[in-house]
Image (cartoon, rainbow, N blue to C red):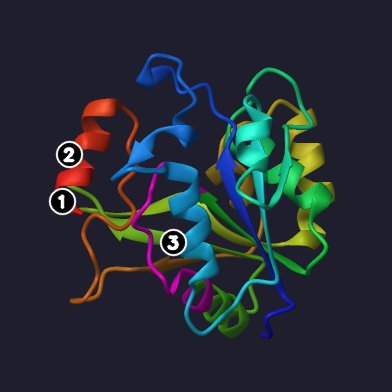
Amino acid sequence: MTEQNITGLILAGGRGSRMGGIDKGLQNFNGTPLTLHALMRLQMQSGQALSDVMIVANRNLAAYESLGVQVWPDSTDGFAGPLAGFLTGLERCETPLMLTVPCDSPLFPLNLAETLSQALIDADAEIAVAAAREEDGHVRPQPVFCLMRVSLLESLVKFMQSGGRKIDAWTAQHKTIVVNFDGPDSDPHAFFNANTLDELHRLENHA
């Protein structure tokens, strides 16, 4: 892999319904907007630099554009979920691979791109999905942390046109490798997503 291979995509297009409908990606985490945390962590990736980063957002576009990267609204209507963000990113991506991260997990690993891309190559897979240990102790896939081949655009278009909305139902149609981030040095909060303001404040206390 080279630094020209991967574009990062930050998913910030949700309704934020569990935060009372506010724009989650612009909420502060230790004094800095969540989306800016995600952007900085993508730019700090070790071992596998990204050639570009984009943001998918559906409101307050000027605020996101002020972060200095390209911002695109969903190409589908109605806040159709993370897959709509995947679709928008694939339509705009100019590299063979695209790495997606949510805006509400500000502590994701700095070796995310390197680890997923190496697993994708080793398995000759089409998609690599991160997995992590959750608060109940079980290791589960974290499907919004996803490295995919841009050649899957047509497949995703067909899936969504047929009414599909679940990430795992789409990835199950392709050769997908699940990559565990569960080593002894792993931060147990690395993939924690803050869905409510209370969860966001708890994560701030941890950080």
Give the magenta part as a residue range.
102-115
* Residue 80 locus on image (x, y percent): 64, 25
The circle drawn on residue 206 is: 1
Q: Name the mark on residue 130.
A: 3
Q: Nearer the viewer, mark 1 or mark 3?
A: 1
Q: Nearer the viewer, residue 60 or 82?
A: 60
Is there a contact, CB below 8 Å, between mark 2 and mark 3? no
Amino acid type shown at disc 2: Arg
Specify few, some or many for label 3: CA neighbours under 10 Å numbering under 14, 14-19, or 20 or more.
Answer: many
Image quarter of residue 5: bottom right
6 relative position to 193: left or right = right
Q: Is residue 82 left or right of residue 108?
A: right
Residue 9 x, y percent position in the rendering? 63, 53
Q: Residue at x 62, y 82 (%)?
A: 121
**Residue 139 appears in the figure:** yes
Quadrant (top left, top right, bottom left, bottom right) of the C terminus: bottom left
